[in-house]
Image: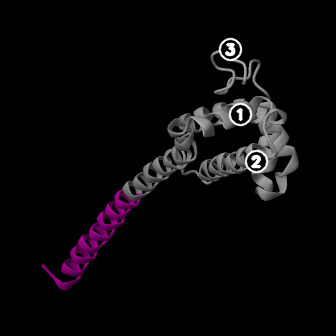
């Protein structure tokens, strides 16, 4: 065997090693991306749970939320302020979820569920009232998205899901 043949074989082995290294890195990047997406999706669910958790734990806060969604005028000034703070947090959580979807970090099927839930809540009279008062506290992209949502045929929130009237 001459030196030219040995050189050609070593170049071939080196090329194969480079291709295998690139393939290995591609698999690792794919796995990292998948883990990042799963973490993002979990963080989105956690963020919304943190916003809605007080509604389950405190009957008065739940009442303010439920009544405020359907008739913000039925709340006292103090209760309206609490409702507006909750509405802001709720919509900010959805803005983050929307951001994750736009940048490809949210599974499309999961996003469709979030989008469907948001459609119901932004159609609620109290939430629509808040949205009309404070759209500038949200990104332009999110404002455009929310404003493009078709209202559901039948709006269902915690205030209307069981046919209960606010009180």
Is 44 placed left or right of 11 in the picture?
Answer: right
User: Element under label 1?
Assistant: helix
> In the orientation shown, which residue stands out farthest toward the bottom?
3
Provide the residue designation for mark 2: 78
Provide the residue designation for mark 3: 163
- Which disc, if any, is residue 155? none
Query: 81 or 147, which lies in front?
Result: 81
Residue 104 x/y as whole percent: 58, 51
Foreground: disc 1 or disc 2? 2
* Residue 9, magenta (yes or no): yes
Q: Is residue 6 above or below residue 102?
A: below
Q: Evaluate whether residue 119 shows in this view.
A: no
Q: Earlier in the sequence, mark 3 or mark 2?
A: 2
Q: What residue range appears in magenta? A: 1-29
Provide the residue designation for mark 1: 121
User: Element under label 2?
Assistant: helix
Check disc 3: other Cα within 10 Å, few if <14, some if 14-19, many if 20+. Answer: few
């Amino acid at each position: 065997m001459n030196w030219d043949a040995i050189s050609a074989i070593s170049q071939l082995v080196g090329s194969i090693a480079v291709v295998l290294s690139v393939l290995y890195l591609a698999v690792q990047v794919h796995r990292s991306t998948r883990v990042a997406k799963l973490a993002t999706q979990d963080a989105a669910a956690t963020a919304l749970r943190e916003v809605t958790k007080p509604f389950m734990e405190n009957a008065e806060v739940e009442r303010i939320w439920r009544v405020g969604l359907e008739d913000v005028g039925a709340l006292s000034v103090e209760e309206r302020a609490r409702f507006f703070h909750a509405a802001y947090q709720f919509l900010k959580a959805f803005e983050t979820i929307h951001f994750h979807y736009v940048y490809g970090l949210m599974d499309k099927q999961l996003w469709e569920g979030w989008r469907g839930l948001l459609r119901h809540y932004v159609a609620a009279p109290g939430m629509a009232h808040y949205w009309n008062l404070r759209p500038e506290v949200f990104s332009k992209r999110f404002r455009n998205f929310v404003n493009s949502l078709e209202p559901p045929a039948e709006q269902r929130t915690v205030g209307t899901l069981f046919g209960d009237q606010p009180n």
